[in-house]
Image (cartoon, rainbow, N blue to C red):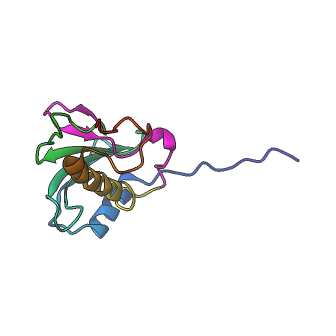
Amino acid sequence: MGNKRYLKPQPITIASQMLRIQQLYRSNLIEVLKAVNSELICVIRLQPSEHSDIYRIKITYKISDISPKAWLLAPEMKTYDGKYPHHIYGKDERGHYQLCVHYHRDKNWNQQMFIAESFIPWVCTWLNTYEYWLITGEWHYDEAFPGKNKKKK
């Protein structure tokens, strides 16, 4: 049968990602949306439910990245029983926590996906789960490592 060659799917461009964010989110929610050195930078206000706080989230993305990244800018991250949720990475240089929105090895993100249609809704799910965690101390959403966040009785 000869050699079959397939074209590798091309990533969605940064410009197209920015356009889709503008199309799906009201301009009064978007504080910053720009490209700097081939990196998308977006600061957006998100409210996961009508009774939720309003969160300022910074999202960055480069085509060379495995997936977009999100940081909680405001309000400050709260603790439950003196502990921060384990679904965060480290802090940036300004002390903002990077959110663990999805586990990259699960490959649920790919470069043919729009950030506006996938990653931003995932951030909202993270925020909603975080608010529930602040009340109960339990993370009620899928986890890459189940059992890590079981509340001790």
**Residue 82 appears in the rendering:** yes
- Report whether residue 42 is seen: no
Q: Is residue 103 magenta?
A: yes
Q: Is residue 77 above or below residue 116?
A: above
Please name the residue shown 36% across and 52% down the image: 14
Q: Nearer the viewer, residue 82 or 122?
A: 82
> Quick check: 125 left or right of 49?
right
What residue is drawn where x is 33% and y is 59%?
A: 121
Identify which residue is drawn at 44% across, 54% down. Answer: 12
Task: Write down the quadrant of residue 86 in the picture.
Answer: top left
What residue is rendered at 39% in x and 45% in y? 102
Indicate the position of residue 152 as horizontal and vertical percent values: 29, 35
* Span colored in magenta: 88-112
Q: Position of residue 24 (x, y in %)?
A: 30, 68
Residue lying farthest to the right in this orientation: 1
From the viewer's perspective, is 23 left or right of 147? left
* Residue 48 part of the magenta-drawn span: no
**Image quarter of the C terminus:** top left
Residue 131 in picture, x, y percent from top left: 21, 52
Q: In this figure, what is the number of numbered marks?
A: 0
| Viewer-closest of 120 and 21 | 120
Q: Residue furthest front?
A: 153
Label the magenta part by its dominant secondary structure.
Answer: loop
